[in-house]
Image (cartoon, rainbow, N blue to C red):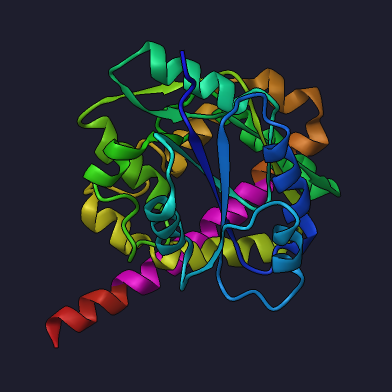
Amino acid sequence: MNKPLVSVIVTTKNNHATLEACLESIKRQTHQPLELLVVDNHSTDDTLDSARRYTPQMFTKGPERSPQRNFGVGKAKGDYVLIVDSDMELGRDVVTACVQVATTSSDVKAIIIPEESFGQGFWAQCKRLERSFYVGQDTIEAARFFNKKTYQQVGGYTEDMIGGEDWDLSRRIGALHRIGRIDQFIRHNEGRLYFMRTSRKMYYYAQHAVEYFAKNPTTSALTDSSGPLQRYKLFFSKPGKLVKNPIVGAGMLLLKTAEYASGGLGYWRAKRKANAQTTE
């Protein structure tokens, strides 16, 4: 029996520092056949030079990752597509495990691949601990492996959505089909995390959360299934993980609180601006 072709789509922008490890992990996948496509957003560093060593299928598309991903899927020849960020590294059997689930369960059209973080410095340790709480949480983890026809039928990622686009796509597919999961991991390279930079990043994405909640209404962003209150509830439901290394546990809670404070400010300002525009 012939194995299905899987297209792995990597989106990039000035990611030379992490891209080569990402592409090497894709090259080493145990599943074959596999094609690799890199969709770059006008990089000005050595990103494209790194990509050329791994694939001739390189494209340029912007302005954000959702249009890049949809463009890549449009160019893909595979029966299945795997969406990968350029700071991720795949375990060797990730694609094999996804194909096994997808081909043995005909009602599964998308698959969640759990992630674990690694990086340099104290705050990267905190982020690693945080992400460990999310494994197995369907409302927080989002699918990355898709049946290509299903992906295209639902319209792929919403291109004007910069924050929450992963959850949005998973929810749309989940309303029609079953979403599966595997126990192989993607390793997310956080690099060296900085407290203020991470908070500013949350502020940026939260400014665009208005579009997400407009398409995915909720009674409150605070009490949403993936929102702050549910996450703190999840953290404190496993106190052993917090106190195993109490300094890292306290740091994680501090970092997450700072992110939510920054994100809340960004969301409030964006919401206020949107309301002002509708009343003009």
Q: Residue at x 58, y 18 (%)?
A: 183
The foreground one among 70 and 164 is 70
273 sits to left or right of 78: left
Q: Quadrant of residue 210?
A: bottom left
- As drawn, the residue found furthest toward the front would be 1
98 sits to left or right of 247: left
Residue 49 visible: yes
Residue 119: x and y, percent? 80, 46
Q: Residue at x 79, y 60 (%)?
A: 17
Q: Residue at x 63, y 58 (%)?
A: 56
Residue 278: x and y, percent? 15, 79
The residues colored magenta run 254-271
Q: Quadrant of residue 57?
A: bottom right
Is the C terminus in the top left, top right, bottom left or bottom right quadrant? bottom left
Relative to 103, does residue 235 appear above or below in the rendering? Answer: below
Q: How many marks?
A: 0
Relative to 262, does residue 42 appear above or below in the rendering? Answer: below
- As drawn, the residue found furthest toward the bottom would be 280
The foreground one among 239 and 48 is 48
Residue 62: x and y, percent? 47, 72
Residue 189: x and y, percent? 73, 46
Relative to 104, does residue 182 appear above or below in the rendering? Answer: below
Q: What secondary structure characterizes most of the magenta part?
A: helix
User: Residue 258 lies in magenta, yes or no?
Assistant: yes
Residue 117 visible: no
User: Residue 39 lies in magenta, yes or no?
Assistant: no
- As drawn, the residue found furthest toward the right would be 121
The foreground one among 69 and 33 is 33
